[in-house]
C-alpha cells in the first residue's frame, strides 16, 4: 500500500544526535497542520450534539437519561474502536488507517441528520464513536513517524489544540445552520467536512522516507533519535508492561473529565445561567480559546524543559504536575458570582486538561518503539472511553436525582493528581519497555 521508498542520505543516530542535527525544512509541520484540521473537524462532529442538546430536548422530548444513554453508546463504540484502531494503525500505518476512520465518522455524522428518535441517535452516535476513535491513534502514530522525541509533545499539543478549535467553531456555526436550515443540516455539513479533509490527507501524507518533497536534512533530523532496539513486541505482551498501564490508567482517570466538559457544559450554562442556543456561544468560545492556549503551552513547556537539558521524565512530569494543580479549583465554578467568573475557572481547568493531554499522549512514544505506539495508544484510549461511559451514566444519574453539577466538578478537580501519582508509581523514570 505504501509507495516505493526514495533514496536518502544516511541518518544520524546516537544519544546526542538530536542536539547536533539541524532540520533542513518544515514539511513535518505541514503534516502537523493536517492533524490539527482533522482534530478540529473531529470535535465539531463530536460536540454538535451537546450544543444542540437544549434544542433537541425540546423538539424530540428527551429526558436527561435519554441524553446520557446517547452519550453512553457513543463512548461504548469509541472504546471498542480505540482498541481496534490502535492495533490497526500499527498494521496499516497512519495514512490508510486514518483514511478508514475518517470515512466512517464522516458518513456517520451525516447520517445523524436523519435520526428522529433517541434510539436513532444512539445508533448514529455509536457509528460516529467508532470512526472518531481512530483520530488520536492515527495522529500520535503520525507524530511518532514525523518528529523526534524532543518535538513530539509540542507537535501533539498543536494538533490536540484542534479539539478546542472544533469546540469553538461548533457553538458559532450551529445556531446559524439551525436557524436558517434546521438542525439536521448542522450534521450534514459537519460530516461533509470530513470527506473534504480525507481527499487532502490521501494526496499529501506519506511516511517520511516515502515522501518525495522531504529534504535529506529534514529526514536526518526526524530520524535523529537512537534507532529502536531490535526485538519483537507482540500485542498481548503490551498488557504485561507497567508502562502500558501507567498510560492507560492515566487515560481512564482523566479522559472522562474532558468528556464531561464537552458533553455537559452547554447544559450547565443553560441551567445555571439561563442561556440558550443563541446565547451560550460566547462563554463556550472563551473556554475553548483558553483551552487552546493550554494545549500548546503544556506541550511547549515539557519540550522546552527537555531542550534545556532536563530528562524526558522530569520534563513531562513537571508539566503534568502544573496542569494537575490548575484543575483543582474547578469546583468553585458552581459558586461563582457571575457567568464570566465561572468561565474563567472552567477555562483554567480545560486548559490544564489539554496541557496534561499533550504530555500524556506523548508517553507511549517515550516508552515504546514506534512499531508499538499505535497499539499502546489504543489500549489507553479504550480505558479512557470506558471511563467516559461511567461518567455519562454518573452524570445522568446525578442530574436526574440532585440536579447539581457539584459532584461532577469535585471528581474533576481530584482526578489529575491521583492519575499522576499512579503514573509515577508505575513508570518512575519513563524507561523504555523491555522487548521480547
Image (tube, rainbow, N blue to C red):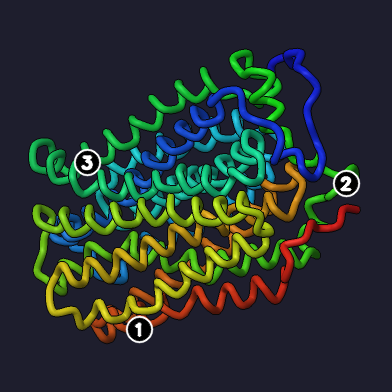
In the image: residue 19, left or right of residue 205: right
Q: Residue at x 50, y 56 (%)?
A: 301
Residue at image mark 1: 407
Q: Which residue is mark 2?
A: 232
Q: CA distance from mark 1 to mark 2?
A: 45 Å
Callout 2 touching callout 3 (CB < 8 Å): no
Give the quarter of the image for residue 50: bottom left
Neighbours of disc 3 within 10 Å: few (<14), some (14-19), many (20+): some
Q: Position of residue 406 (x, y in %)?
A: 30, 83
Comes first in the chain, label 3 or label 1: 3
Q: What residue does disc 3 label?
A: 184
Closer mark to the observer between disc 3 and disc 1: 1
Q: Quadrant of the image for the N terminus?
A: top right
Q: Judge from the rendering whether residue 311 lies leftward or rightward of residue 285; answer left or right.
A: right
Of circles 2 and 3, which is in front? 2
Q: Cβ–Cβ below 8 Å for labels 1 and 2?
A: no
Amino acid at each position: 500500500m505504501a509507495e516505493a521508498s526514495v533514496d536518502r542520505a544516511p541518518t544520524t543516530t546516537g544519544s546526542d544526535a538530536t542536539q547536533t542535527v539541524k532540520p533542513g525544512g518544515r514539511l513535518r509541520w505541514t503534516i502537523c497542520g493536517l492533524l490539527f484540521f482533522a482534530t478540529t473537524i473531529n470535535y465539531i462532529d463530536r460536540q454538535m450534539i451537546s450544543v444542540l442538546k437544549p434544542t433537541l430536548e425540546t423538539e424530540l422530548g428527551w429526558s436527561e437519561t435519554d441524553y446520557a444513554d446517547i452519550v453512553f453508546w457513543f463512548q461504548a463504540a469509541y472504546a471498542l474502536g480505540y482498541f481496534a484502531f490502535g492495533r490497526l494503525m500499527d498494521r496499516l500505518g497512519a495514512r490508510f488507517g486514518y483514511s478508514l476512520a475518517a470515512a466512517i465518522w464522516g458518513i456517520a455524522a451525516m447520517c445523524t441528520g436523519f435520526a428522529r428518535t433517541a434510539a436513532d441517535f444512539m445508533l448514529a452516535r455509536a457509528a460516529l464513536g467508532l470512526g472518531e476513535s481512530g483520530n488520536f491513534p492515527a495522529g500520535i502514530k503520525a507524530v511518532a513517524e514525523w518528529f523526534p522525541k524532543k518535538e513530539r509533545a509540542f507537535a501533539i499539543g498543536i494538533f490536540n489544540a484542534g479539539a478546542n478549535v472544533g469546540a469553538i467553531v461548533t457553538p458559532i456555526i450551529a445556531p446559524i445552520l439551525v436557524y436558517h436550515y434546521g438542525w439536521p443540516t448542522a450534521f450534514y455539513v459537519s460530516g461533509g467536512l470530513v470527506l473534504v479533509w480525507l481527499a487532502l490527507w490521501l494526496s499529501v501524507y506519506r511516511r517520511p522516507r516515502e515522501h518525495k518533497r522531504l529534504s535529506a536534512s529534514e529526514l536526518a533530523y526526524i530520524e535523529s533519535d537512537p534507532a529502536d532496539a531490535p526485538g519483537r513486541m507482540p500485542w498481548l505482551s503490551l498488557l504485561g508492561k507497567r508502562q502500558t498501564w501507567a498510560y492507560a490508567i492515566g487515560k481512564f482517570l482523566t479522559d472522562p473529565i474532558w468528556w464531561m466538559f464537552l458533553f455537559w457544559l452547554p447544559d450547565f450554562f443553560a441551567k445555571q445561567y439561563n442561556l440558550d442556543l443563541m446565547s451560550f456561544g460566547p462563554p463556550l468560545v472563551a473556554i475553548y480559546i483558553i483551552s487552546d492556549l493550554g494545549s500548546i503551552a503544556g506541550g511547549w513547556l515539557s519540550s522546552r524543559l527537555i531542550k534545556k537539558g532536563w530528562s524526558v521524565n522530569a520534563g513531562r512530569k513537571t508539566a503534568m504536575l502544573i496542569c494537575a494543580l490548575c484543575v483543582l479549583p474547578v469546583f468553585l465554578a458552581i459558586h461563582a458570582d457571575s457567568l464570566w467568573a465561572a468561565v474563567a475557572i472552567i477555562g483554567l481547568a480545560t486548559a490544564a486538561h489539554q496541557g496534561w493531554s499533550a504530555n500524556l499522549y506523548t508517553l507511549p512514544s517515550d516508552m515504546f518503539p514506534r512499531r508499538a505506539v499505535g497499539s499502546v495508544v489504543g489500549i489507553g484510549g479504550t480505558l479512557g472511553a470506558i471511563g467516559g461511559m461511567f461518567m455519562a451514566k454518573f452524570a445522568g444519574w446525578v442530574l436526574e436525582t440532585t440536579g447539581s453539577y457539584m459532584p461532577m466538578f469535585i471528581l474533576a478537580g481530584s482526578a489529575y493528581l491521583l492519575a499522576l501519582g499512579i503514573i509515577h508509581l508505575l513508570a518512575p523514570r519513563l524507561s523504555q519497555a523491555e522487548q521480547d
